[in-house]
């Protein structure tokens, strides 16, 4: 007997995935798998590295007035009478600039443990949210070490104070200012921190190069959270296989 009739069609898969997104199942699955990792000895160790990556979605072609209304958190009036048009419009995604280039979509804020390079926490926002605004959402209280690594975008008096209050030790890059460049010692310190912080880039690189890229073809924050969460979960599953394979290799 063939299997053709048992394979769900694209619409069925799409509806099922949407149902998972609506009830927040992906976040629960991610948490359950993290517990699975810890039960098998893969604890969050060595400190935590935080960073964010832009996740693009198809660009919306809206008028200037529509864009202004959406940015204000409202829905354009004429869309209410055009349900077919409204369901194709993403009013949650936002524009942002990085290295002088404009991007439209969301952000995947992640926390990676230094020792195993596994994603321990994540938080999804629109792309306009500054990286530093999601720090408290992704800090991992279970990490066995106190160090926190991040690039200079995360350095501020408020974040330094918050980390200290939580008993965490900042390893965040220092940043120079106009007429007040970094000293030679501070530059050397940043170079040392970079050797640890770069591990988080490997995660984003794997998601982009080995897992089909970071573009998500979905509409709205709820669906984006589900797809980005699945990407983080899948990365951890792949990483676990790598860790197990490395552990099996004799020294």
Image (cartoon, rainbow, N blue to C red):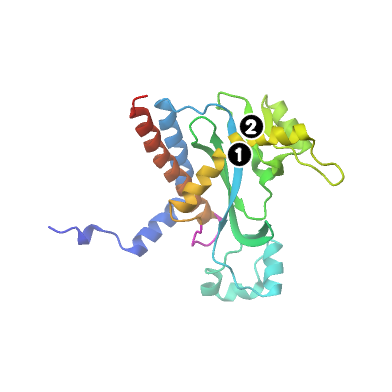
**Residue at the image point whose x is 46% and y is 46% from the top:** 26
Give the crowd class for mark 1: few <14, some 14-19, many >=20 residues within 10 Å. Answer: many
Residue 216: say if magenta: yes
**Residue at the image point whose x is 21% and y is 61% from the top:** 5
Give the crowd class for mark 2: few <14, some 14-19, many >=20 residues within 10 Å. Answer: many
Q: Quadrant of residue 212?
A: bottom left
**Residue at the image point whose x is 40% and y is 59% from the top:** 15
Q: Quadrant of residue 94?
A: bottom right
x and y percentages locating residue 178 in the rendered image: 85, 47
x and y percentages locating residue 45 in the rendered image: 53, 26
- Position of the N terminus, as image quadrant, is bottom left
Distance from the alpha carbon under mark 1 to that under mark 2: 7 Å
Instruction: Specify start and end residues of the magenta stretch as a single range.
Output: 215-221
Residue furthest to the right:
179
What secondary structure is marked by label 2? strand
* Secondary structure mainly formed by the magenta segment: loop
């Amino acid at each position: 007997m063939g299997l053709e009739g048992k394979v769900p069609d694209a619409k069925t898969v799409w509806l099922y995935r949407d149902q998972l997104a609506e009830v927040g199942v992906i976040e629960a699955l991610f948490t359950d798998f993290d517990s699975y990792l810890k039960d098998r000895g893969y604890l969050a160790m060595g400190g935590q590295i935080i960073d964010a990556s832009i996740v693009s979605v198809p660009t919306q072609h809206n008028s200037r007035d529509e864009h202004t209304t959406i940015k204000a958190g409202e829905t354009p009036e004429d869309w209410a009478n055009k349900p077919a048009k409204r369901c194709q419009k993403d009013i949650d995604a936002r524009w942002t600039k990085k290295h002088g280039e404009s991007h439209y979509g969301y952000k995947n804020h992640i926390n990676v443990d230094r020792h195993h390079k596994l994603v321990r926490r994540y938080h999804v926002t629109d792309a306009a949210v500054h990286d530093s605004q999601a720090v408290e959402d992704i800090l991992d209280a279970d990490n066995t070490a106190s160090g926190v690594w991040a690039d200079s975008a995360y350095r501020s008096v408020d974040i330094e104070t918050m980390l200290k209050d939580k008993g965490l030790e900042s390893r965040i890059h220092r940043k120079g200012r106009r007429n007040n460049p970094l000293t030679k010692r501070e530059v050397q310190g940043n170079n040392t921190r970079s050797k640890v912080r770069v591990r988080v880039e490997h995660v984003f690189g794997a998601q982009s190069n080995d897992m089909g890229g970071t573009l998500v073809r979905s509409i709205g924050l709820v669906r984006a959270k589900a797809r980005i969460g699945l990407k983080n979960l899948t990365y951890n599953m792949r990483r676990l296989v790598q860790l197990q394979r490395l552990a099996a290799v004799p020294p």
